Amino acid sequence: METKLAEAKTKHCVLLDANVVYHKLSKAKGLETRARLRAEIARKVARIRLWFHRDENTPKLVPESKDDFVSFARVTFTNGRERYLLMFR
């Protein structure tokens, strides 16, 4: 009986995993589903800042290299966390 309960809890946690939900939503083609995904992103993302070239005001994320990035973005979430996305040639 306890093993069945443990299995049910595990399956329930997998079903509620946000990564699974977002992956399925990102593959969806329906307008209503895509609108729900956009609303969820808007709820969690506070700001996105883009840079398209380096200058003296650009944050120094990586040292100068031959494989220099083309542009990058700083994503600030509503919980205060920040993530950077680098786009290379």
Image (spheres, rainbow, N blue to C red):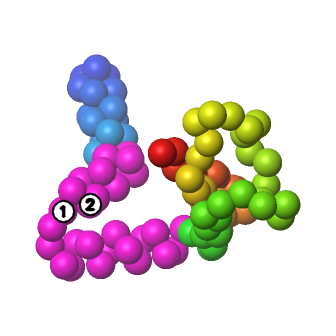
Question: Where is mark 2, residue-wise?
Answer: 25
**Closer to the camera, 42 or 57?**
57
Residue at the front extreme of this rendering: 66
Residue 15 sits in which quadrant? Answer: top left
Say whether residue 15 is visible: yes
**Closer to the camera, 81 or 52?**
52
**Closer to the camera, 45 or 52?**
52
| Image location (x, y in percent) of residue 5 | 29, 30
Residue 51 lies, with reference to residue 35, above or below; the image says: above
Say whether residue 77 is visible: no
| Image location (x, y in percent) of residue 70 | 56, 53
Q: Is residue 86 magenta?
A: no
Quadrant including the N terminus:
top left
Per the picture, the main secondary structure of the magenta-coloured stretch is: helix
**Closer to the camera, 76 or 44?**
76
| Image location (x, y in percent) of residue 27 | 21, 56
| Image location (x, y in percent) of residue 72 | 60, 56
Residue at x 74% of width, y 38% of height: 64
- Mark 1 Cα shell of 10 Å, populated few (<14), some (14-19), many (≥20): few
Residue at x 64% of width, y 69% of height: 49
User: Relative to 21, is 27 on the left or the right?
Assistant: left
User: Relative to 65, is 40 on the left or the right?
Assistant: left
**In contact (CB < 8 Å): disc 1 and disc 2:** yes
Q: Amino acid at mark 1?
A: Ala
Report the number of discs. Answer: 2
Residue at x 31% of width, y 46% of height: 20
Segment colored magenta = 16-44
Question: Where is mark 1, residue-wise?
Answer: 28
